[in-house]
Amino acid sequence: MQGRFLTIKKSSWLALSFIVNILFFIVGSVLSIILLHQYNYWFFLFCFFIGIHLFFKSIMFRFDSCCYFGILLFFIGFFYFYCYLFEIFQYYSVFILLSFCLASYITSFFYYQPFQLVLAISLFFVSIGLILYIINYISLFIFLAFLTVGVLILVVKFLTIK
């Protein structure tokens, strides 16, 4: 049967995933406020757990949009805690770009979408340029050249899609 996984309906699995992820979110938010006195973790915990739920939904029902958005939210939450752990918040904008890059790459891998792969490659080049600009290895004009190359790759691929 197509609507079942391990003899349980896929919608039941999805509801269970939602309930479990919301419970983890609530417990994590309460613990971060009470124990760590961090009042802004709730948003990134929400991104993390809803990202897991949406990725699970994309696996169950083969939705490419849920895959992209779920991976994007998951990595936004993950990279926030990564930056917090290693105290590298000055590079968080690079990690946001890498979240988009990873979401595009994984979506292109699972759903065979060549434009998503080109988007991932161009975002990767832009994130390399951004990290080099942030650590002052390149000037603003060279960073803008990286950005222009990334946009040109996207435009050329978009115009040549068959």
Image (cartoon, rainbow, N blue to C red):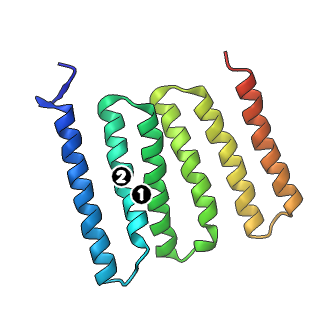
The quadrant of the image that shows the N terminus is top left
Identify the image quadrant of residue 59: top left
Given the image, on which type of amino acid does mark 1 rest? Cys
Q: How far is disc 2 from disc 1 in space, using C-alphas?
A: 5 Å
Expressed as whole percent of the image width and height from the top left, the position of residue 153 reads: 76, 35
Residue positioned 40% across, 78% down in the render: 39
Q: Are marks 2 and 1 in contact (CB under 8 Å)?
A: yes
Residue positioned 59% across, 27% down in the render: 114
Given the image, on which type of amino acid does mark 2 rest? Ile
Identify the image quadrant of residue 132: bottom right
On residue 47, the disc is: 1
Q: Of 85 and 70, which appears nearest the observer?
A: 70
The quadrant of the image that shows the C terminus is top right
Q: Which residue is mark 2?
A: 50
Q: Is residue 6 visible?
A: no
Count of numbered labels shown in the rendering? 2
Residue positioned 49% across, 58% down in the render: 76
In the image, is 110 to the left or to the right of 29? right
Q: Residue furthest right?
A: 141
On residue 68, the disc is: none
Residue positioned 29% across, 33% down in the render: 60
The secondary element bearing badge 2 is classed as helix
Q: Is residue 133 visible?
A: yes
Mark 2 surroundings within 10 Å by alpha-carbon count, few (fewer than 14), some (14 through 19), many (20 or more): many
Q: Residue furthest left?
A: 7
Asked if residue 131 is positioned above or below residue 149 in the image, the reply reads below
Q: Of 75 and 42, which appears nearest the observer?
A: 42
In the image, is 133 to the left or to the right of 82? right
Asked if residue 75 is positioned above or below residue 109 in the image, the reply reads below
In the image, is 115 to the left or to the right of 7? right
Asked if residue 54 is positioned above or below residue 41 in the image, the reply reads above
Identify the image quadrant of residue 139: bottom right
